[in-house]
Image (cartoon, rainbow, N blue to C red):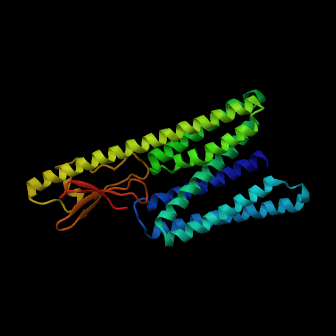
Amino acid sequence: MTNQTERMEALVKLILAVLCFFGLGIIIDYEYAFPAQVVAWITGAGLVFYGVMRYGKIKRKKFEQGPAAGSKEERTTLKALLTAAAGIGLIAFYYISPTGLTFVYTASILVLLVSAAAQMRKVIVKASVPASKTKSDTIVTIVIAIALFLFDAFVSGFIYVAMVLLLVVIPIILVKAVKVRKDRVLLKQALINAGIYALTAVAIIVMFNVNNTIAIKRTEMIADACERYKANFGEYPSELTMLVPEFMKEIPSAKLDFLFPSRFHYISLKDAHTIWYVKVPPSGRPTYSLERKTWGYID
């Protein structure tokens, strides 16, 4: 595969990852509406189309090569079929399960980003002079790690990326390290890459806990503002926006995520007023009851 082809495939995967990302952002707070359905269908169709096209291309190549086609083509065929299956699953889960849809979106984003990064790594390393190949590989791994950290810690608010790194990516790298253990240069590079991804996973987990500590503190701030509102007007507000600007300058986002801010939700009933936010999208919703002054969980 030429460098130009590698770049084009990486670009297609990045576009599909962006579509998955925006689909995920639309449903992050259970906003199931027409735009979410459109994005799910467009993204799912894109994944199916790309998977089928890759499958057809591989089959033509195997037909032309005949017995010369090796196990690499078999693996690539499987990846193409899984891509198409992910597209079908994405559309299906939109109608079946929000949790399943979120998982498919997240898994697709991770796989597409890692795959695109791997292809760009090949392009960069191939273009490097032999003496700098190891350095280039390390730099690319660091860039990928930073991108994954920023995505999970400040955009999606998931902890799934850390789990995938710890349970899938790092074990695969370590298996490869065992296979190339006789080559000290390749072994060292594999261990460096595994170490970088391990540090990334730890950083994501730490940031996940920091974000949820911030959410708890901000929930308590809003609850305190609601109490002051009640002291003035004799009842809790029917909407959180009624606290602004007299009791709060603004209603903050629940966490430090920027592109799709985690907003606070408020349930106002006659004898029950509850503040809640999403801890681990789409489920995992801590609640705070203003009447009981206690924390709970929806799911």
As drawn, the residue found furthest toward the bottom would be 95
**Residue 14 location, x and y as percent?**
61, 52
Does 270 sit above or below residue 243? below
Depth check, front residue: 166 or 251: 166
**Residue 252 location, x and y as percent?**
30, 49
In the image, taking residue 186 as reference, residue 168 lies left or right, namely left
Regarding residue 31, the answer to whether it shows in the image is yes
Depth check, front residue: 297 or 11: 297
If the image is split into quadrants, where does the C terminus sit? bottom left
Q: Which residue is painted at 78% across and 61% down in the image?
A: 57
Does 200 sit above or below residue 161? above
- How many marks on residues? 0
Q: Which residue is painted at 21% across and 67% down in the image?
A: 269
Q: Which residue is painted at 67% across and 50% down in the image?
A: 10
**Residue 229 location, x and y as percent?**
14, 54
Q: Which residue is painted at 41% across and 65% down in the image?
A: 31
Instruction: Please tell me in which quadrant of the rendered image residue 29 appears.
Output: bottom left
Depth check, front residue: 195 or 30: 195
In the image, taking residue 121 as reference, residue 89 lies left or right, namely left
Does 179 sit above or below residue 39? above
As drawn, the residue found furthest toward the top would be 131
Depth check, front residue: 22 or 89: 89
Regarding residue 46, the answer to whether it shows in the image is no
**Residue 20 location, x and y as percent?**
55, 58
